[in-house]
Image (cartoon, rainbow, N blue to C red):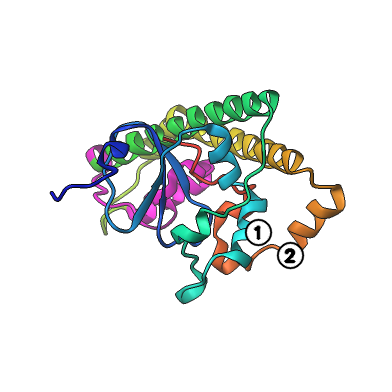
Amino acid sequence: MRSCAYYDAFERPKIVYQEIQYHSNFAIDRAGRLGNNKTFLLTTNGPEILVALNSPIMLWHNWRYLPHMKDGALTPVAFKMEALPLPQFDDAARASAADLSNQASAAQRLVREAERAMLDWLRQGRGIKRPVGALASASGLDLDGFVTAVRSSLPKKTKVTAADIAELRREHAATIEPARRARGEIFALERQLSELVNEVHGLTPDEVDLMWRTAPPTNAVHAGWASGGQGRAQCG
């Protein structure tokens, strides 16, 4: 590997983000991971910076500020990011951002672990090697949706007995339902984070209303905007 003036920055906690974004997608890496030429990094791991970057108001701004690529994708080029307007958090706001982010990260880890456990169970116990459709995000399914998705993903001609249905119900209650509750908690926490950033920016209620009324097109933004803008980026 060629010499790099900032190589040691990869080894330290940092904020990483993609070169091509359809929605705000910033994350903290604490594991010293390396990135390729389609990712960038910021040599900071301040939770308030991460929260500000992932907020709906920042996406609203970036949609109008960053260069656009094919299909509405944004490219956070370096010279634009250097001039990005970030709010100034006081100590109380910074502490709130850290606390809410930590709660969201914990809930997101629970969801990820539940998804992995469920995929392992479906593969080993049900013969479903590659879940498709709704089953690929099983933590978002209620009981009926989960049962239907599993039945649709089973190998052809597989018979489903009453005992099989009962087993699916038990597995949903044990693994999926806690993850569904965690997803609800994440949604609520993301809304609080969004409101915190708006407050730090000093936005008035009318300005917040204008932001939501003039949101970027939904076909180019993804779930990040609809859920309050934090998306998956609270997780390291």
Q: Which residue is mark 1?
A: 60
Query: Can residue 1 be seen from the camera position used here?
Result: yes
Q: Quadrant of residue 109?
A: top left
Is 10 displayed left or right of 190 in the figure?
Answer: left
Chief SS of the magenta region: helix
Crowd band around label 2 with a 10 angstrom C-alpha radius: few (<14), some (14–19), many (20+): few
Q: Amino acid at mark 2?
A: Thr
Between 179 and 93, the residue placed more toward the observer is 93
Between 95 and 143, the residue placed more toward the observer is 95
Tell me where the magenta segment starts and ends, as one range: 124-153
Q: Which mark is residue 214?
A: 2
Marks 1 & 2, CB-CB < 8 Å contact: yes
Total marks drawn? 2
Q: Residue at x 51, y 53 (%)?
A: 82
Please identify the residue farthest to the front as the structure is shown. Answer: 5
Q: Residue at x 54, y 59 (%)?
A: 222
Between 202 and 134, the residue placed more toward the observer is 202
- Quadrant that contains the C terminus: top left
Is 218 displayed left or right of 164 in the figure?
Answer: right
Alpha carbon separation for disc pair 1 and 2: 8 Å
